[in-house]
């Protein structure tokens, strides 16, 4: 599930790419400090791992504690903890049976087998029991470990767990929609049996319309139930309902409470939402430091998930741009084009094979991630001697997956072949092998050499690892300025870990002046590349399939997380009145809210839309002055031709600003210069402006007064009236003579004949209308 992201947090405040040394450090003690106690990682249950996430605010204290404890103290404390655990373990008392009230004896012998815990063996009803002496057969002393009610509840939960696991197995193993729908029927059954994880799955499916019919009300009821049970996922989603006013009356205060509880429970999406709210000042006082805390925590998790292959591609498709230029703005590949490349690849076109391999490796542009297809294409191209394909095969073997088994030796073989041919991807891969000792002994000098070669050719992985070596002083003298340079270069290539490392440097002021604002923006970028970003594509597909209600809910959740593209897309769907789940009276005010948030993140179309809403009074009162401010911002900051044209019109009409025809002309001219598309409307507007200007000039001068000051005798002579009459007579004579000649030229018909209708040409030869 896209929202199942509540894994263990990455404790380190340094990236795995930054801290190459940290990867080599011995953490064999496998301990973790939580609220002053140390736990063995290996003995940690799922519930404990969730509990530990509740203490994320003490992360720095935990790290300091670990540094202060030497290995002897750690082992002493562990032994002490384990002893205490043994002492404090509750003593089970037998209920009923032949030894009611006596303590259970562990281990006990039954049917020549020792039992260290209660068992249901030997009973048809499945109820747990224990013996109160060592040898049950000899003494026949026994009792139940649970009441009948507890037994029934346990069996019910076990049944629910079995149903849930069946559903999840079908869901994870199938890509067909029909089977996924079947899987959700199992999950629905488990949810009816109060299985928490099943309830979480079903509530989200009902909310988004994923394989179940969308039902906000049913989803809300399940989420309220989950919230009462303390589910962080339920708390976050209920907060979302209150924030967006879906199925409930909108309440930002309640939303904030639920988001906060969700974050305290370790829900990463809740952390991300709070990070954005503190950054933008939504419902809370703006606080860069608070935003930094939340965003850094999520970014740690996202960065720890990033693999050598760089993770999946985030497809950001803007619906407003798609409507203007279908297919142009989306960056999606048409199905026909993909088939054409596949045809070329089958015919042996190496470039097509490598291109398709990369598309399937990372996913994106309308192509689903498929490692099997990627491996096949790279193999074909590598066999044809393509160095790029060899290097990517090396990456796949180095990484390992369900399709390609992890093998350092095979990866090294491909990296060497590619590097010998001067391929930067191969050089970078070889550098990684020498840096971490994968298949070869660790050799920092050789690692540095290969990373430099790859970086010189502009390969992002080479730049990133080179920056990492300079940052940590591995194989070279520590140099933060050089590290910053290479991280910046890698970030220009879009590498997530480069953004992460730069964010860490700006957050801590390492090698640069500390800047909370820059750090938050960089961490936000990293967070937006998490696995939940796949929902952007799911929402887009829902919209394309005509399910605007499902699309708008998905976009609204992503908008809460701070995705600008989701904010503008949600606003666009609301603006077009395509979502029926939102009341007609609320459509424009909600759209205005999301246009506002998208505009604050620098989206030009959103800024112009804000101007339009205030100009026409959509979702707010008509306010020409505010509209003028938004248009001016779009004009000055983003040089928008549309905004310049609108400013010209407002100056021409004197709306929200003093009427000024000269300024109007200036803005019209600027719009024509800014965009060729604006030239025709600008020409028409200028023609109209010319007419208005002429009329205004005529209106301003008094014609009667002008004529009274003109002396015709002085201007044309004393007999000017005779000249004028002569000219008029000549003109009249000319017109009469011309009319008579035209009348004579028309030939008269010899006799009256019935008119023959002209035959119409056949339809295919007709001129187009």
Image (cartoon, rainbow, N blue to C red):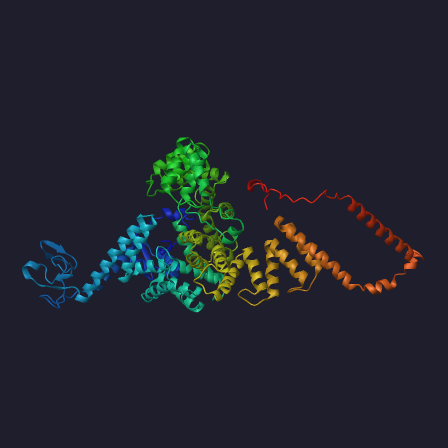
- Is residue 712 shown above or below 462? below
Residue 341, image x, y percentages: 44, 37
Q: Is residue 38 left or right of residue 630?
A: left
Q: Is residue 406 visible?
A: yes
Residue 215, picture quadrant: bottom left
Left or right: residue 119 compared with residue 296:
left
Residue 736 spot, x, y in % from top left = 82, 50
**x then y, percent, for residue 473:** 45, 46
Q: Residue at x 93, y 56 (%)?
A: 717
Q: What's the residue at 35%, 38% (across, down)?
A: 408
Write down the quadrant of residue 447 in the picture: top left
Point out the residue furthest to the left here: 138
Foreground pick, 110 / 374: 374
* Percent coordinates x, y for residue 518 in the rendering: 51, 55
In the image, farthest residue toward the front = 751
Q: Is residue 349 left or right of residue 683?
A: left
Depth check: give the residue in front, 556 or 54: 556
Viewer-proximal residue among 363 and 270: 363
Q: Please identify the residue farthest to the top as the structure is shown.
A: 384
Q: How many marks?
A: 0
| Foreground pick, 738 / 466 | 738
Q: Is residue 691 above or below residue 313?
A: below
Look at the picture and state if 316 lies above or below 624.
above
């Amino acid at each position: 599930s896209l929202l199942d992201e509540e894994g263990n947090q990455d404790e380190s405040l340094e990236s795995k790419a930054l801290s190459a040394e940290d990867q080599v450090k011995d953490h064999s003690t496998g301990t973790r400090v939580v609220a002053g106690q140390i736990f063995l990682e290996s003995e940690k249950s799922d519930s404990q791992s969730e509990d530990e996430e509740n203490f994320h605010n003490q992360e720095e204290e935990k790290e300091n504690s670990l540094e202060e404890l030497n290995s002897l103290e750690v082992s002493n404390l562990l032994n002490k903890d384990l002893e205490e655990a043994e002492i404090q373990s509750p003593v089970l008392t037998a209920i009923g049976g032949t030894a009611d009230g006596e303590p259970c004896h562990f281990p006990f012998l039954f049917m020549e087998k020792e039992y260290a815990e209660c068992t249901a063996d030997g009973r048809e009803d499945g109820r747990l029991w224990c013996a109160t002496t060592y040898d049950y057969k000899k003494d026949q002393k026994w009792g139940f470990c649970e009441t009948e009610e507890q037994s029934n509840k346990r069996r019910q939960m076990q049944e629910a767990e079995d149903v849930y696991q069946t559903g999840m197995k079908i869901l994870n193993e199938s890509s067909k929609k029909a089977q996924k729908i079947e899987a959700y029927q199992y999950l629905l059954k488990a949810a009816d049996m109060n299985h928490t994880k099943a309830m979480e799955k079903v509530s989200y499916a009902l909310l988004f319309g994923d394989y179940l019919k969308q039902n906000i009300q049913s989803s809300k009821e399940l989420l309220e139930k989950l919230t009462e049970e303390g589910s962080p996922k339920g708390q976050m989603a209920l907060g979302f309902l209150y924030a967006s006013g879906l199925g409930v009356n909108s309440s930002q205060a309640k939303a904030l409470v639920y988001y906060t509880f969700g974050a305290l429970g370790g829900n990463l999406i809740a952390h991300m939402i709070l990070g954005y709210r503190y950054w933008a000042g939504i419902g809370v006082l703006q606080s860069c430091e608070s935003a930094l805390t939340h965003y850094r925590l999520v970014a740690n998790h996202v960065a720890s998930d990033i693999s050598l292959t760089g993770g999946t591609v985030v497809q950001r498709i803007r619906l407003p741009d798609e409507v203007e230029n279908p297919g142009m703005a989306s960056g999606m590949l048409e199905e026909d084009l993909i088939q054409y490349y596949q045809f070329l690849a089958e015919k042996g076109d190496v470039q097509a094979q490598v291109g398709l391999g990369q598309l399937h490796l990372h996913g994106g542009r309308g192509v689903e991630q498929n490692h099997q297809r990627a491996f096949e294409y790279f193999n074909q191209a590598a066999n044809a001697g393509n160095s790029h394909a060899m290097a990517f095969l090396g990456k796949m073997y180095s990484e390992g997956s369900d399709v390609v088994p992890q093998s350092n030796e095979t990866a090294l073989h491909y990296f060497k072949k590619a590097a010998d041919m001067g391929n930067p991807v191969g050089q970078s891969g070889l550098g990684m092998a020498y840096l971490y000792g994968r298949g070869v002994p660790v050799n920092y000098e050789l690692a540095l050499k290969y990373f430099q070669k790859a970086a010189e050719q502009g390969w992002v992985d080479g730049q990133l690892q080179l920056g990492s070596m300079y940052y940590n002083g591995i194989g070279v003298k520590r140099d933060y300025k050089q590290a910053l340079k290479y991280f910046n270069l890698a970030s220009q290539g879009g590498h997530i870990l480069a953004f992460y490392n730069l964010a860490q440097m700006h957050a801590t002021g390492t090698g640069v002046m500390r800047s909370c604002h820059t750090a938050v923006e960089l961490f936000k970028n990293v967070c937006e590349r998490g696995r939940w970003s796949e929902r952007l594509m799911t929402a887009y597909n829902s919209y394309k399939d005509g399910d605007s209600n499902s699309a708008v809910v998905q976009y609204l959740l992503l908008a809460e997380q701070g995705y600008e593209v989701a904010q503008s897309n949600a606003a666009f769907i609301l603006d077009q009145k395509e979502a029926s789940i939102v009341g007609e009276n609320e459509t424009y005010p909600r759209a205005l809210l999301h246009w506002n948030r998208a505009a604050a993140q620098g989206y030009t179309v959103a800024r112009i839309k804000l101007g339009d809403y205030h100009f026409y009074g959509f979702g707010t009162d008509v306010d020409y002055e505010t509209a003028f401010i938004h248009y001016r911002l779009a004009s000055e900051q983003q040089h928008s031709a549309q905004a310049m044209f609108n400013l010209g019109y407002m100056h021409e009409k004197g709306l929200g600003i003093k009427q000024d025809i000269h300024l109007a002309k200036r803005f019209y001219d600027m719009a024509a210069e800014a965009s060729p598309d604006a030239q025709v409307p600008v020409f028409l507007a200028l023609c109209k402006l010319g007419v208005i200007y002429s009329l205004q000039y005529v209106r301003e001068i008094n014609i009667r007064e002008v004529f009274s000051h003109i002396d015709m005798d002085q201007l044309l002579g004393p007999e000017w009236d005779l000249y004028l009459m002569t000219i008029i007579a000549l003109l009249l004579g000319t017109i009469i003579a011309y009319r008579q000649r035209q009348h004579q030229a028309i030939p008269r018909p010899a006799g009256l004949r019935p008119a023959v209708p002209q035959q119409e040409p056949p339809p295919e030869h007709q001129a187009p209308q």
